Image: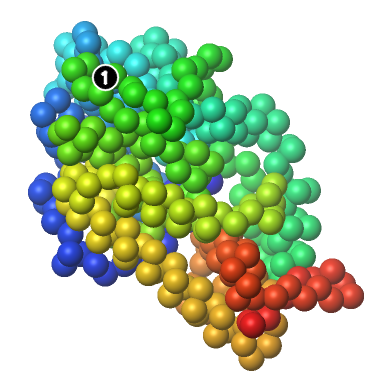
Amino acid sequence: MSGAGRYSAPMHDETTLRFPLAEPPAPGGLVAVAPGIQWLRLPLPYRLNHVNIYLIEDDGGWAVLDTGLGTPECRAAWEAVLAGPFAGHRLTRMIVTHFHPDHVGLAGWLHERHGLALSMPRPEYLYSLALQHAPADLGAEVHRPFYRRHGLAAEITEVVLSRGHEYLRRTTGVPPTYHRLRHGDTLRIGGRAFDVLTGGGHSLEQAMLVCPSERLFLAADQVIARISPNVSVHAMEPDLDALGIYLCSLADLRAAIGDDVLVMPGHGLPFLGLHARIDALTAHHAERCGVIAAACRARPLTVAEVMPHVFARELDAHQTSFAFGEVFAHVNHMLAQGALALETDASSTDRYRAL
């Protein structure tokens, strides 16, 4: 659950958005994105090659929002910043938005190295623990029948499963204790009071922070400017309407947050134009549902058979697993909406027919 596979193709609504900062921070550097908020960018070994980290001025130092991937490259980038532009400054605590390894990957390392306490939503923290301490429970024997039931060829299934448990290689664990973040909490960081919002779909209960008085929105991966965050269904919860959860979250964000906030996302550039971006994301998923309905009208299709209609480009093993989950999320949403019907054949293969 990492990197480029978790994001869909570019979406072209840039003309409705404004980007106050045209360039990201240079490697090992920082950019002031707002008063008392510094922007750090860490490298990722994927097609999406970076994650944004934010340092927020706190009492006696700076709080860290998200950590980066648990790789030597990300550790080296942290070391360069702490020895360079941030030399002499103290880190006070870390706030992690969700369990994906590019956001939580160095939590254990930052805790051990700098003594930072962790704040995180409970489902995100507990799922991190589950992936670290009981990986076999979520491994190949769970996913193999899941992929096969929904039409993924045996040889492709084995290639996807051959990637192994990448989460363990991309994270450094989490501290044994944490502070729970809940929707509706007020989180005080230095002189600011942030409202804590949570939303599902991309993750379980991803945390976001909004400061209405200063029109600042730390959006994590829920709203990104030029890409659509991956919304997937996985073997653990195959009937989940993850896309419905995500679309409800977007609607809630649109109602709760003004259109004049500066959006600071987990990837890409900070931007203005939150409501237009939410509208574009909503339309993007409606368009994908239309593509799937058209594909399933001629004959019932498995999730694997739908994938080429949604993702025309060639996919590697990493991208295939996320594309599969993304298509499945749209299929489940369309089932819930009454747009598709499920048909299971004698070999227990599931196919979907447009209504």
Q: Is residue 203 visible?
A: yes
179 displayed left or right of 320: left
On the question of residue 158 being in view, the answer is no
Q: Is residue 6 above or below residue 333?
A: above
Residue depicted at 60% across the width and 57% down the height: 241
Location of residue 341 (image quadrant): bottom right
**Which residue is at 18% across, 29% downward?**
37
Q: Where is residue 338 in the image (x, y as percent from the top left)?
A: 63, 72
Give the amino acid at mark 1. Answer: Ile
Q: Residue at x 67, y 65 (%)?
A: 156
Q: How many marks?
A: 1
Identify the residue at horizontal 87%, vertical 72% (top origin).
347
Left or right: 85 with respect to 65?
A: left
- Which residue position is annotated with label 1? 189
Q: Is residue 301 left or right of residue 267?
A: right
**Which residue of the protein is positioned furthest toward the bottom in this rendering?**
298
Where residue 10 sits: x, y (%)?
33, 65
Residue 141, image x and y in percent?
78, 48
Snapshot quadrant of residue 348: bottom right
Front in this rendered view, residue 79 or 248: 248
Residue 322: quadrant of the picture: bottom right
In the image, residue 172 lies at what x, y percent? Answer: 50, 26
Element marked by disc 1: strand
